[in-house]
Image (cartoon, grey):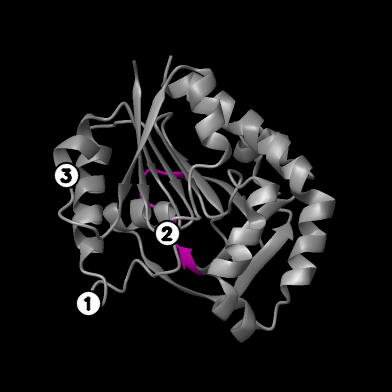
Amino acid sequence: MATCLALRHVAFEDAGLLGDVLAARGIGLSYVEAGLGSLDKTALMQADLLVVLGGPIGVYETDEYPFLLDEIAALRARLDARRPTLGICLGAQLIAAALSARVAPGPAKEIGYAPIDLTEAGKGSVLAPFEGVDVLHWHGDNLDLPSGAERLASTKFCPTQAFTIGTHVLGLQFHIETKPQMLESWLIGHALELSKTGISPSSLRAQAAKSGEATAAAGRRVLESWLAGVMS
């Protein structure tokens, strides 16, 4: 059986829809909990697929969260070996940092269901199902496009919303894996951030009711298509 290892930073930001897509392909999924014990870099290298999930910390906060240095080093080795890797939100930022690209706070937080602007490359990529379909944004940091990467999507406040490197790496600043029925756990887990930004949970519930199912359907198509390319 092929194996997928997911590096998780907070419990409620899990593989979500990706877990269902992996199961349908007969791919086993297991989690590594970030910061809990030493990081098994050999396991991260050997997994057929590595998924680096999101979280509410910054790549650059290595003094406060020193385990990030081990994650970046492990990612650098995996990327150098051209092993299939998917990064979501913080995960995409960690991939960028591993490739020496700058990650820093952006001009504004993006939180909620809203569209992305696909580049011409993006329109011809696995992200094509998101032409005119909302994604779930939940980030405040931006990343520079890593050397050798191709930009697939952007927004007004975030020039690099998605990128690819060859066929083996996909980085997404936004969330397509989150099941709409699980949004409540995000509203609880990010309650302090929502309060600070003046965003009401009820407004996000309303957005999820309107866009969540379409986002999930498009997200499933993207994940199925990308996995077919890297796990064939």
Q: Give the quadrant of residue 115.
A: bottom right
Tell me if mark 2 has few (under 14), some (14-19) or many (20+) residues whose alpha carbon lies within 10 angstroms of its own: some
Q: Up-down: is 3 above or below 193?
A: above
- Amino acid residing under circle 2: Val
Determine whether, in the image, residue 146 is placed left or right of residue 174. left
Whether pointer 1 and pointer 2 mark residues with C-beta atoms closer than 8 Å, the reply is no
How far across and how far down the image is residue 34, in percent? Answer: 29, 56
Is label 2 in a helix, a strand or a loop? loop
Q: Which mark is residue 10?
A: 2
Tell me if mark 1 has few (under 14), some (14-19) or many (20+) residues whose alpha carbon lies within 10 angstroms of its own: few
Q: Give the quadrant of residue 139.
A: bottom right
The foreground one among 120 and 189 is 189
The foreground one among 175 and 24 is 24
How far across and how far down the image is residue 81, in percent? Answer: 22, 33
Determine whether, in the image, residue 71 is placed left or right of residue 55. left
Determine whether, in the image, residue 23 is placed left or right of residue 188. left
Q: Which mark is residue 40?
A: 3
Q: Which residues are magenta?
A: 141-150
- Amino acid residing under circle 1: Asp
Q: Quadrant of the C terminus?
A: top left
Q: Which mark is residue 63?
A: 1
